[in-house]
């Protein structure tokens, strides 16, 4: 999958649509979750700070049904082991190309540099047991 053709395709598509074009290397039997949904939830969880498959599974379990549905996980949260198996089967190079192509379409030129705007906020008044406030991030 050449990155130049990916960039051209990415211009008119959402990340979930691009992820849906990846071939699913999993066996057909026993598939409960779509590959695109698993990858999108994993990407969102890592963007939100998850650093392990266990943390991705926990993030998915804590996310609401609306959040998961928006990420293509219409059948609810997957288990940590499901994320682990799905990401192990996907080519890291191809996934990198897809995400890179999509991010490239969100970038603009500023002072000769290619930049992506990221907005983040700490949720006021909401703290977990460790006293940390959740953070929200957005890439327009």
Image (cartoon, rainbow, N blue to C red):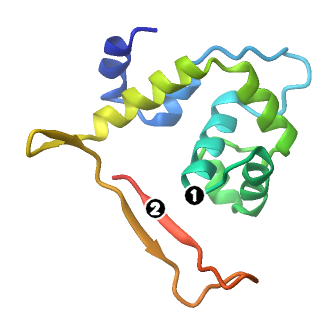
**Residue 21 at least partly seen:** no
Give the labeled residue for mark 2.
137
As rendered, which of 78 and 49 lies closer to the eye? 49
Residues at marks 1 and 2 touching, judged by CB atoms closer than 8 Å: yes
> Tag 2's secondary structure?
strand
Residue beneath the point at 35% across and 57% down: 118
Task: Indicate whether 123 appears above or below 52.
Answer: below
The dot on residue 17 is none
Q: Of all residues shown, which one is farthest toward the top?
A: 1
Residue beneath the point at 32% across and 29% down: 12
Residue beneath the point at 69% across and 62% down: 64
As rendered, which of 3 and 28 lies closer to the eye? 3
Give the labeled residue for mark 1.
48
In the image, taking residue 11 as reference, residue 14 lies left or right, namely right
Q: Of all residues shown, which one is farthest toward the right?
A: 30
The crowd level at tag 1 (other Cα within 10 Å; few <14, some 14-19, many 20+) is some
Mark 1 and mark 2 lie on one chain; the one further toward the N terminus is: 1
Residue beneath the point at 75% across and 25% down: 88
**Residue 67: x, y in percent?**
62, 57
Task: Indicate whether 110 appears above or below 30.
Answer: below
């Amino acid at each position: 999958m050449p990155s130049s053709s990916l960039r051209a395709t990415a211009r008119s598509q959402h990340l979930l649509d691009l992820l849906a074009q990846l071939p699913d290397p999993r066996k057909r039997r026993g598939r409960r979750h779509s590959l695109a949904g698993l990858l999108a939830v994993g990407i969102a969880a890592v963007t939100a700070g998850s650093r392990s498959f266990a943390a991705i599974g926990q993030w998915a379990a804590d996310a609401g049904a609306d959040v998961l549905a928006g990420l293509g996980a219409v059948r609810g949260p997957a288990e940590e082991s499901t994320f682990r198996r799905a990401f192990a089967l996907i080519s890291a190079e191809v996934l990198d190309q897809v995400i890179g192509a999509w991010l490239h379409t969100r970038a603009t030129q500023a002072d000769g540099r290619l930049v992506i705007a990221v907005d983040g906020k700490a949720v006021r008044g909401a703290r977990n047991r460790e006293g940390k406030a959740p953070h929200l991030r957005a890439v327009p």
